[in-house]
Image (tube, rainbow, N blue to C red):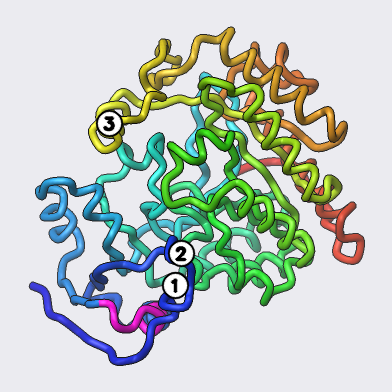
Amino acid sequence: MKRAISSRSASVTEKLPMRYFKPERVLIEAAAQADPFARQILGRIAGVPCEVIEDAEAWIRNLNGRPNALTRGKKLLLLRRHHGRFFKPFPLIPEYLSCHFQVLHLGSGCDLDCTYCILQAYLNNPAITVYTNFEEGLRELDGILTEERSCFFRVTTGELIDSLSLDHITRWSVPLVRFFAGTANAVLELKTKSDNIAHLKEADPRGRVIVSWSMNSEAIQRTEELKCATLAERIEAARRVQEWGYLAGFHFDPLIVHEGWEAGYARTVAEIFASVREDRIAWISLGALRFMGELKKVAEKRFPRTPIFSGEFVRGLEGKYRYFKPIRKRLYTKMRGLIRRYSSRVPIYLCMEGPELWQSGLETPLSNSRELGDFLDRAAGKACETSFHEHPIELPQLRHL
């Protein structure tokens, strides 16, 4: 059952860049209507048609049964309560080194629509979804950090949803930053391809928050990263948040082999270091294109002109398709050399690779996930301490849940 609700107020989205997400329609679960966070969101997108639904799962099943469900879903905002744990460790894949971060789940789906996005094949809910019991998630996290004082946590919100692309609607960045500013055993990494950073200026991170951007060559950004901020806009956003007291991070993931890739990535690296302070970069990660077989089918149907899945790939140990190992090694070696032209100290790490490439492709020959987790814990703690002496992080015992 659905029923419409309406509002006459002006929407804040009317004053923002056209590329910022403005839903065509909002669906709110009946049980979520009483949540203060839901009411705040509805106030910011007033004027957008809104319907109350009794059963979100039934509504999702109905949407999945319609043609072009993924494309339709990216125009819809679903507000619903989250049931279950908000805070979970990123799943480990035994065959590859995992970076041992923890995920605070605030929603799912991404409005930015990259051709290679794994969410197209991973999620069973096509709609952009925001959980309205946000405060319950923070209370859950607070309880875990308090109980596990001997653990150091690297936390992200950006696994199933972009951390900032919806921030003009949710504004969850401010309470998140203020929460982590008061913690002694955790840092937050906000991962994005957006330049939607305005609200970050409202909170002092006290060295506990890293804002990181997925980066690529300009050719890939133009043709495969639809609705995203340009590389120049991402770099400018990184420069600005550093001025506001944040650390910056960069993720070259996925690295994609394409015509002129070496020169393209060289330009991106050069532009980063020309604008962003090296001493306030927490880390740079490298990961080669990898995908599930189902993603190739979905992506080529939605984006028939994309050429990135047409190369030769081998099936990896975890079942995803990857470039052959010599190609991945060449990518990583080239990228490491480009980064080291400008910085000898910024930590570099690989995403979802085995010990062999770590030992042949980077300066830090790690052999298992625990070593990588400890390496990144130290990198986060060192970056925060050296960049913000007034609020140094004293690392607890380095162990993970």
Q: How many marks?
A: 3
Q: Label 1, on which residue?
A: 169
Q: Give the mark nearer the N terminus: 3 vs 2.
A: 2
Magenta region includes residue 46: yes
Q: What segment carries the magenta color?
A: 41-48
Would you call the spot at circle 3 few (<14 residues within 10 Å), some (14-19), or many (20 or more)?
A: few
Please tell me in which quadrant of the rendered image residue 23 appears: bottom left
What label sits on residue 304 in the rendered view?
3
Q: Amino acid at mark 3?
A: Pro
Percent x, y for residue 190? 59, 55
| 388 w.r.t. 204: above or below | above
Which of 187 and 17 lies nearest the eye of the viewer?
17
Identified at 79% across, 64% down, the residue is 243
| 339 w.r.t. 235: above or below | above
Q: Quote the CA–CA distance across marks 3 and 2.
A: 27 Å
Would you call the spot at circle 2 few (<14 residues within 10 Å), some (14-19), or many (20 or more)?
A: many
Residue contact between numbered discs 3 and 2, judged by CB atoms under 8 Å: no
Q: Label 2, on which residue?
A: 166
Identified at 69% across, 41% down, the residue is 399
Please tell me in which quadrant of the rendered image residue 54 appears: bottom left
